[in-house]
Image (spheres, rainbow, N blue to C red):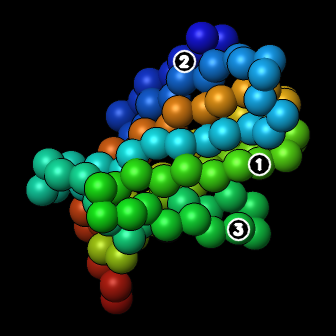
Amino acid sequence: MISSCRTAEYSSKKFRSGSLSKIVVSGVVYDTSIDSVLPNAAIVIGDSVYWTGPNGRFICSLEEGNYKFSARHIGLEVITTEPFSLKKGDSLELNFRMRTDRTPLVD
């Protein structure tokens, strides 16, 4: 493992495997209000959107670069990570813990 990070909203673990030619990012999105995985959450990476499956998991392959990841779902607060610098052979495990968005729709 190269590095790890844990906040109230997400946790990450970055691994290095010289045998991979692509960067693999995977993880799970949880809804803390119901203490369960969250299907159909959007994981936004730049201009691309990936969706979690019925088990709350997502997986994607990326090119080298610097990335911020956002988890989004209707009725829940958006979570955006700090930037990650990813290189060929890196794997990133990224788990999100989403909570209810209490922002009023109208003032």
What residue is rendered at 87% in x and 40% in y?
64
Q: Are marks 3 and 2 in contact (CB under 8 Å)?
A: no
State the residue in front, 21 or 77: 21
State the residue in front, 99 or 47: 47
Residue 4 is tagged as 2
Q: Residues within 10 Å of mark 1 (few under 14, many from 20)?
A: some
Residue 48 is tagged as 3
What residue is rendered at 60% in x and 11% in y?
1
Badge 3 or badge 2: first in the primary sequence: 2
Q: What's the CA distance linking mark 3 and mark 2?
A: 24 Å
Q: Residues within 10 Å of mark 2 (few under 14, many from 20)?
A: few
What residue is rendered at 61% in x and 32% in y?
92
Disc 2 residue type?
Ser
Residue 25 position within the rendered picture, expressed as x and y whole percent measured from the top left: 61, 41
Q: What's the CA distance linking mark 3 and mark 1?
A: 10 Å
| Residue 99 in view in this figure | no
Identify the secondary structure beneath mark 2.
strand
State the residue in front, 7 or 24: 24
